[in-house]
Image: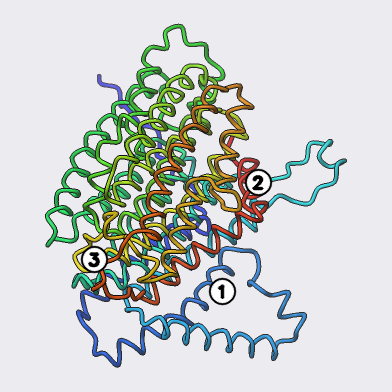
Amino acid sequence: MLAQVTSPPVQTPDVVWSALTPLMTLAVGAILLIMFRSIVKRMPAEFDAAITTAIGPATVLGMWIVGGLVGNDVPLADLRDDVSEPVFYIGLIAVLVLSAGFVRSMRIGFDAAFTVGVGLVSFVATVVLWQQHFRPADLSEADLLAGANPGGGPIAAFGTQYGLDGFALVFGGLIALAVVSSALLFDGYLRRERLEGAEMYVLLMLSAAGGLVMVGANDLIVLFLGLETLSIAVYVMAAMHSRRTEALEAGLKYFVLGAFSSAFLLYGMAMVYGATGSLNLLEIRAYLEATILIDDAMLLIGFGMLLVGLGFKVAAVPFHAWTPDVYQGAPTPVVAFMASAVKAAGFAALVRVFYLSFIGFAEDWQPVIYALAVATLLLGSLLAIVQRDAKRMLAYSSISHAGFILVGVQAATGRGVASVVFYAAAYTFLVIGSFGVLTVVSGEGDRATSLDDLNGLNRRNPALAFAFTIFLLGQAGVPLTTGFVAKFEVIGAAVDARSFWLAIIAMIAAVVSAFLYLRIVLSMYLGSADEEAEPISVNPAAAVAIVAALLLTIGFGVVPGPIDQLANDAILAFTG
């Protein structure tokens, strides 16, 4: 007689919808834009201007409503009580009118305005989640001595597979702001290149949604799904300029090498599962803390393969070969998104996997990351100075910056992870501003990015030359910019971890890289411009993105305390 085999009941994970709001905003926004454009291909000019203008106040209301749904109270409720309801609502109407006028003054298209609005709503939802759950409380010394937690606990947003902690929210906010900035850069670029359409914006939001999944993944399968969602959209975005063979080549190369790295990531996940019996990051950590592995060869092989897969996304040497060609061939606003949001998501995943789950085996993976950091710093900075194209220069510069962030990862300490958060925040705006300037000056065809094309930029548009100079000096680590503080933080973390030689190599790489940035600055101010070259006009939407990045670079460079405090608070609220 055969015995009846019963399988254990499937447990439905608990879902906290408010914690999923930033992710759902981007995903639903992409779906709504697809549905709208499938019905309305092109609107009359008058109607298009009216509905685009209306997105301004709609975004303000959306941020207010979503903030109320995510938080414990309606935003600005205290202000309403202090100034009385009539004054409050009069002020609200004034803000709505001003937002409509601001959108109209930018002369932005509907698809770009809609994407900017979705990104801002996602960012506000992230900020409210931080305020409600992860902002450290004002505790007395007695409370701290009694064991009170100065930070909030993690939110199990989707069972144990996906959650939000302070670390995930900071990176999620960076990705949302990268969506806003990239959409502003796309508007004028797509019209200039005659590539109008909603496809790029839809892919932008879908890719960012994948990035949000990565930064909050507590399971390797969920991490892989987020990585592929982010990557596949970017593969297509890189090849969207179909009239440029360089763009098609960039998309194909990025896709092939990306698929190759994904295979390594999957094999690494299989090895980790074979060694620990789980793919959940928290369960893996608990297992490794409670178990002494007699033979850890399978786990170490898993470490190596995971590093290969994630090293490709962050462009660490020797997994960087795709970076210069893809950065040069892809549309410049796409490169801005890749160098900011995609790199931030990759480093968030790298820290989440190795610091959260494998911190007990830090002595095994630290030497590997040490070697990767050295190779990435030296190769990125040395190869950058022999390039003649600004996009290729910034591509190798991006590789060098990845080396600096790896210096913080290698420390495997709380200060090291905080330095990674600070560097990612600073670099996000530096690189968006840099590629924003190149988006404007590259001209029709997106090819005028060589040093010769930048000659005399100061005479063609002094404001652009000044902004680009600040961004380049920030990447060089000049004081009074966020780049200086970011480099100081990661090198300080390396010194605290007694990685003295790595800190020295990082400082040498910073000096070598400074020569690269000065070459570009000298071309802009001392190079001889073509006398027939026309002055460069800046699209208003692109100007907003560049100015915002410039103000953040200088502002938080002069007063770095808020971002430094944010980075440290994020570590207090890090899962585990």
User: In this rendering, is residue 101 above or below 192?
Assistant: below
Instruction: Name the residue tied to disc 2.
Output: 569
User: In this rendering, is residue 281 above or below 42?
Assistant: above
Separation (CA) of disc 2 from disc 3: 37 Å
Number of residues whose C-alpha sits closer than 10 Å to that of mark 2, classed few (under 14), some (14–19) or many (20 or more): many
Q: Secondary structure at mark 3?
A: helix
In the rendered image, the quadrant that contains the N terminus is top left
Of the pair 132 and 308, the residue shown nearer to us = 308
Separation (CA) of disc 2 from disc 1: 25 Å
In the rendered image, the quadrant that contains the C terminus is top right
Q: What residue is at 52 percent from the left and 51 percent from the top?
A: 426
Q: Quadrant of residue 539?
A: bottom left
Of the pair 132 and 184, the residue shown nearer to us = 184
Instruction: Name the residue tied to disc 1.
Output: 64
Mark 3 is on which residue type?
Glu
Residue 282 appears in view? no
Look at the numbered discs 2 and 3 and tell me whether their residues touch, using CB distance below 8 Å. Answer: no
Mark 1 is on which residue type?
Trp
Q: What residue is at 43 percent from the left and 29 percent from the top?
A: 373
Q: What residue is at 29 percent from the left and 45 percent from the top?
A: 228
User: In this rendering, is residue 548 above or below 222?
Assistant: below
Q: Quadrant of residue 112?
A: bottom left
Q: Quadrant of residue 308?
A: top left
146 displayed left or right of 483: right
Mark carried by residue 496:
none
Of the pair 520 and 364, the residue shown nearer to us = 520
